[in-house]
Image: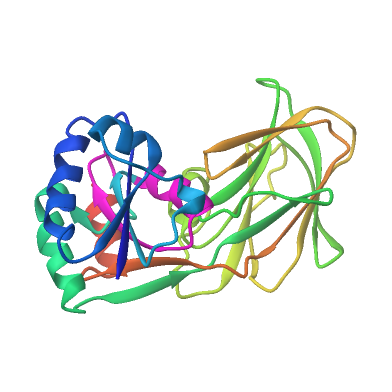
Amino acid sequence: MRFGITSNLKIIGKKEIAKKIINFLDNDFEVLIENVLAKELGMRGVSLEEMDVDILITIGGDGTILRSLQHSKGKILGINAGVLGFLTEANSKDAIASLKRIIKNNYTIEKRIKLKTMLNDERLYDCTNEAVIHTAQIAKMRHFEVLIDGRVAEDIRADGVIVATPTGSTCYALSVGAPIIDPRVHAFVVVPIAPFKLSARPIVVPAQSEITIKLKKPRKCILVLDGQHDIEMSGDDVINFTISEFPAEFIRFDKDFYARIKEKLIV
């Protein structure tokens, strides 16, 4: 079994957590460390893109996991050293206990669908949470046309549009009124941001659908992928979303989806 380690470089104590994990695994397993973290540890490192591992250990929060999933196809063990950690599975104090469970094969794999994103004819990073098309100017609405499988589903003026996976339904989409979607449901939700239309509501569509978003007038917008990458759009672009052939895979132990919601989202 081959392990990889990456971290949010702003996290206090990341080096100590990483060293503890490396010391535990190093004698019996191959361990690869992402370049920048490896440099801080005084060790040899590799890039995430080159990291061919069975399990990728992320030290940080959800942002660290989302970034990792854009560059790696390894199964994710999220060690929460961030703030929310909705997608993480263990706290830093439980890191070694979690690894012992993995070595004993005492875990399950949770697969979650991802969003394949095409800007014109260019494939961009897949999204685990969501893609957001947003006006490039504050307080300036844009006129969007949303098509589902080639048919117009919505024609709307708004600050932007979110296309979210079930995983992303508990993130930005939730904050603007979208429903929570159980990750076992293969569907996407299309959500307008601050629409100028009382009847505008989120639309849930099958994951096998093709979602196309166009601007009715060429105006600059920004496409944001999982909160990690911003792409400027000229305004006459066409964006297509379909289900990715590469699902996200998470190491899971005991907590189910609803226990997570109660713990993280209900206060």
Q: Is residue 70 above or below residue 223?
A: below
Residue at horizontal 62 percent and vertical 70 percent from the top: 245
Q: Position of residue 12 (x, y in %)?
A: 20, 30
As drawn, which residue projects farthest toward the top? 138
Q: Position of residue 162 (x, y in %)?
A: 62, 47
Residue 255, magenta (yes or no): no
Which of these two is toward me, 52 or 101?
52
Residue at horizontal 58 percent and vertical 37 percent from the top: 229
Q: Quadrant of the N terminus?
A: bottom left
Q: Judge left or right: residue 234 versus residue 27.
A: right
Residue 64, magenta (yes or no): yes
The colour style of the image is rainbow
Q: Is residue 37 visible?
A: yes
Q: Judge left or right: residue 264 versus residue 145.
A: left
Which of these two is toward me, 208 or 199?
208
Picture quarter containing residue 56?
bottom left
User: Range of the magenta residues?
Assistant: 62-84
Q: Position of residue 72 (x, y in %)?
A: 48, 56
